[in-house]
Image (tube, rainbow, N blue to C red):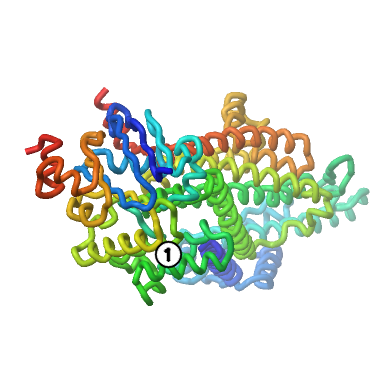
Amino acid sequence: MPIIIFPVMGGAIRISQESVQKAIVGASFAVYTDDEGFVTEAFLEYLYRNNTVVPIEAVSLEDALRQFQETDSSALIYIPRGYHDNLTQSMKGELRVYANLRKLNMAETQSTNVVSSLINIYNYYFSINKIGRLLEQTGGLGTPEAIRSPISIRYASILKGTVLDIPPTSIISLVMSQSIMLPIMVIMMVMFAIQMAATSIALEKEQKTLETLMTLPVSRLTVLAGKLSGSIVIAIAGSVSYLIGFGYYMNSAFAFVPEATTMSIDEVSVGITPFGMLLVGVVIFVTLVSALAMALSIAVFADNVRSAQSFTGILITPIMIPAIILMFSDIDMLPQTVQWILLVIPYTHSIIATKAAFLGDYFVVIRSIAFISVWTFAVLYVAAKIFSTERIITAQFSFGDLWKKLRRR
Amino acid sequence: MHAIQAVDLGKNFGSTQALRGAGFTVNENEIYGLIGPNGAGKTTALRILSTLISASSGRAEVFGFDVARHPEKVREIISYLPEEAGLYQHLTGLEFLEFMAGFYADDKEERDSFVEEGRLISGLGERLRDRSDGYSKGMKRRLLIARALMMKPRLAILDEPTSGLDVIQSVHVRNMIKDYADKQGVTVLLSSHNILEVEYLCDRVALMDLGRIVAEGTPDELRARYGAKNLEDVFMEVTNHE
């Protein structure tokens, strides 16, 4: 399913974004002027050269606005009286842009932005031209660009001791886009696995095959191992299909966005080394085993698939919350109390470890693996205890029963 | 050696006493029946002997293996059919038999022979190639009994083998069990509400009530001992029910 759903979602977003873009590109602008003079004429010529501009002949602004609303144009550029005079006298010339919001959609807002960009470009070259002529007249030193904007900033970043001529924001956005995928993958896998494991044991109860299974000549621990490994295989297959679908979705959905940077992870020397990848593999494995063992232990108390899924819903919450928080922020950035709460949740360490592996902080990764492993052994011990005793057959829990007991008390 | 030796078995579920010192012995190659009303403790006794649950008191041995201390040894020689057993619905009847045979067989040849045996016992013919979710209740039960007997266990524990079946299916299943036990020398321990069924099938029976064995013997012995026409009357007599 995910391999179909995500590409379809991506395709749908891509189609909608492309149509917005097409609407922006194809949008026409109306122009109405109350002014005369060569500066106004030059501006109008610039507009006519760049876009589909509809000139409006009207007797007043009100009349122009009425006519503008009857056209397909999305914005009206109004040149008020005095524009030419102000600019020739080195004063500010004012333009007004009216956006016609017919459907209140993104294309309408974007077309106003396009008008603003056009005017800003004209504004820049007009000022540069003017400064150049003033410099000629006064015989002053310097360039028009330097006078207009005397300070320029060149960003560089220091990464792992290497100085790179790349703005830090570009590196961070690149790293974030990659490092977010790893926690998503881990969470997808864990959630898949939990559902699989819980369903597999609850289905045995629902279909009345569990008792037969438990009297077969295999040890209970083998049954537990079989359930764990089966769920791991399905979870990995499910996650891979999720990732393929999700990757296509991201590519499709954001295909319209112009490339912000042509950098690759290798160029900025961040990314996962083979050793880091190995550690991430270990993190994913221990996380999966503990989540599965917990799901199996909990699902034993359900007598059908529906109850098992509601039980595992409780289990998924403490996995999702740290994942969402840590996807966009760092643990050290959070308030102390929140940090402690998150650190108590074992699955927080899975997210921390995958992010740390990406940044090459292997000490943090190994520390997290140790923590999750201890937790995994504890959960496995509980699961093995449940499987090797009659609890696997007799255990039963329902929220309804609990509520009745509480009411009785 | 006895096939089963249950001594003073007790089982508590919270405050409920399901078994109160039940004891009985099953000889090798015999069909032994536990009869009693609902709640008599029959299923609890069978579940203890098949290692599903543990006794709160007393002890039980299957062919010399203590069920509490050597459950894995016991599971190698028994086959248990629960009263409400089900099938894996996505499997065909044949796939189900193959899957189950795989747990007992040492190699493919042995597995195939178990499956062939199961195919014959079930009598389902070509329908074995259909998915089991399309089977009637009777077909499912026949397949489950075939599963329980196909690998010739030393002890087959059958909980209400004809539960929910119509007369024709019940007769078929009874004959299946009797023929198979006679021919293969399998020891069978079964439970039932149906006293006629037990009289027909069993070499010896134990009457259970309120977690205890209240009488034990061959059907003839019990009828003679209590001067009753059938086991139903014996049961009413020993339990003082009117």
| Spot occupied by residue B202 in the image (x, y as percentages of width and height) | 26, 52
Query: Dividing the image into 4 quarters, which one contains the C terminus of chain A?
Result: top left
Q: Quadrant of residue B40?
A: top left
On the image, the x and y values in percent for residue A69 come to: 45, 66
Residue designated by label 1: B90
Kind of residue at disc 1:
His
Q: Chain of mark 1?
A: B
Is residue A60 found left or right of A361 in the rendered image?
Answer: left
Q: Which image quadrant for residue A246?
A: bottom right
Residue at figure coordinates x 28%, y 42% from the top left: B42
- Residue B33 placement, left or right of A39: left
Nearer the observer, A23 or A18: A18
User: Residue A17 in the image: x percent, y percent?
Assistant: 56, 64
Identified at 76% across, 57% down, the residue is A261
Outermost residue on the left side: it is B242
- Position of B217 compared to B2: left or right? left
**What residue lies at 62% left-to-right and 64% top-to-bottom?**
A248
